[in-house]
Image (spheres, grey):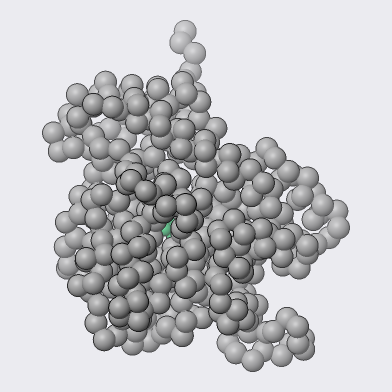
Amino acid sequence: MNKPKKNIPVAAPDLTGNELKYLTECVKTGWISSNGKFVPLFEKEFAKFSGKKFGISTSNGTTALHLALLSTGIGKGDEVIVPALTFVATANAVLYTGAKPIFADSEISSWCLDPKEVEKKITKKTKAIIPVHLYGHPADMLEIMKIAKRYKLKIIEDAAEAHGAKIKEKPVGSFGDINCFSFFGNKTMTTGEGGMIVTDDENYVKTIKLLRDGGRDRSLNFYYHSVLGYNYAMTNMQAAVGVAQLERVDKFISRKREIARLYKEAFKNFPYLDVSPEINGFTSNYWMFSIILKPYAKLTRDELTKTLRSEGIETRPFFHLMNRMPYMHTDERFPVAEYLANNGINLPSGISLTKDDILRVAELIKSVLK
Ligand SMILES: *Cc1c(COP(=O)(O)O)cnc(C)c1O
């Protein structure tokens, strides 16, 4: 009888460092809510990691984006430009504030927001742009920052997928006025659920903390709330895991990059798909190593993912375009984003993948596509 083949997930966290030790400390000392030593420690260390002065932890990446937008005063009547192709949180956060997300197409070279398309979408109501570093490849921040300067717009980076990605040695999540990260379970580093905002501007820090902590300035009176706030705090337990993850994040990133290198080698000169890009001068963290099926490949995307699933190999289709969601529907067309969304697949990209796993995935794909 054949040995059953090993299941290969899309991404699984590696919690084999000091995670359990620090978590145990939280439980033993009773500091399990949002007070405790790991929260400020994680904020400080993560800010350093992203090249910013201040870190403000949040309950998840979506609440980080919501707070970032609120702290700039964006709300009803304002427009915020976001990529048509992103995870839904980017656009949802804009809607939570009462502002309107305006969608823009991607560029085929980076799969991220196309600066030329952004410029076409600017109106008198535009207040901010949220570039997303899709699947870990940096958006063209150099061009986007120029546009922001020219039109006096705020930049809120959605770096949820791009811990450690860089543009010419400068980490993403350090270009924008305010920058947001996620630590969801499948992200490059995780706290289970969790998020972080990093910035150099102390005024944002004050506003964001006030709004995060229920509208109460923690240094002042109990039960006195000066503004309508939220409860978006990270727990000490999440932060404990975060501190442990941060100790090894450089290893996680280099492993992701090695996985991408192995896939790229395996798919070299294979004409039925394109692979995750990496533009010269840009460093991807390859959060999700991905392929785009060519129209002349022998199987459709659904057929390919079904075949892979039957062999125990998990994949994900690319995100749906934002304007296809019923509550933010528009009839606009985004040719590049549409092409990517319709033909893109995230392959297994977790750091525990072995070289044999990667070759098994790549060889199977190659054998069924040609
Ligand atoms: C993961 C992610 C977020 C935040 O997600 P949470 O699950 O709320 O942490 C935001 N934007 C993008 C692009 C993401 O991939």
Q: Quadrant of residue 213?
A: bottom right
Q: Position of residue 45 (x, y in %)?
A: 66, 58
Say which residue appears at 78% left-offset and 62% top-offset: 37
Q: Nearer the viewer, residue 79 or 367?
A: 79
Say which residue appears at 55% left-offset and 70% top-offset: 199
Determine if residue 205 is in view.
yes
Q: Is residue 16 above or below residue 123?
A: above
Say which residue appears at 67% left-offset and 89% top-offset: 225
Say which residue appears at 24% left-offset and 44% top-offset: 343
Q: Is residue 257 above or below residue 28?
A: above
Give the left or right position of residue 273, taking residue 80 as reference: left
Q: Position of residue 78 (x, y in %)?
A: 34, 84
Q: Is residue 283 above or below residue 207?
A: above
The C terminus lies in quadrant = top left
Determine if residue 135 is in view.
no
The single residue placed furthest to the right in the displayed view is 29
The single residue placed furthest to the top in the displayed view is 1
Q: Position of residue 219 (x, y in %)?
A: 75, 83
The single residue placed furthest to the left in the displayed view is 296
Q: Is residue 121 above or below residue 238?
A: below
Q: Position of residue 295 (x, y in %)?
A: 15, 38
